[in-house]
Amino acid sequence: MARRNCDFCTDDKLAQWSYKAGEFLVEDVAIKFKNEWLACDECSRLIDEEDLRGLMERALTTFEKAFPERVPDEFVRGKLKNLIYQTHLEFFKKRTQWRKDPVG
């Protein structure tokens, strides 16, 4: 079965939308990001409004809720916030397609 979770937040809502973006690497964590990004309704709305800050805040909030033990203090929270922001910023720079229904 194909993946269906949102690539922007850790909320357990199923992705309803798909975006294409060129591949990029986030060097701080050595993660290479793929061409297709799936988004839930709320993240898709923020993407379409080009609300980078709102998208980052949503992702940070849902991550903290899902994994509170991974954000033990403000230092870690700040690093995570920066990583999420940088990743989403690169997505916005590399986006090659506006939203469409997800494949599969």
Image (spheres, rainbow, N blue to C red):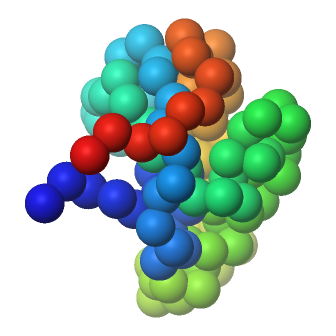
Residue 35 image point, x, y percent: 35, 23
Q: Is residue 40 visible?
A: yes
User: Most extreme residue toward the left, as rendered?
Assistant: 1
Percent position of residue 44, x then y: 68, 47
Q: Is residue 44 left or right of residue 66?
A: right
Q: In the rendered view, does 62 fall on the left or right side of 54? A: left
The vertical placement of 99 against 1, above or below, is above
Q: Residue at x 52, y 54 (%)?
A: 16
- Is 5 left, or right, of 51 in this rendering? left
Q: How many marks?
A: 0
Residue 27 appears in the rendering:
no
Q: Is residue 50 above or below residue 41?
A: above
Q: Nearer the viewer, residue 80 or 97?
A: 97
- Residue at 43%, 13% in the rendered image: 22
Residue 75 location, quadrant: bottom right
Query: What residue do we see at 83% from left, 52% from top?
Result: 54
Check the image and report above or below for 94 versus 66. Answer: above
54 to the left or right of 99: right
Q: Residue at point 47% right, 19% down?
A: 21
Q: Position of residue 60 (x, y in %)?
A: 66, 65
Name the foreground residue: 77 vs 86: 86
Q: Quadrant of the N terminus?
A: bottom left
Residue closer to the observer: 37 or 2:
2
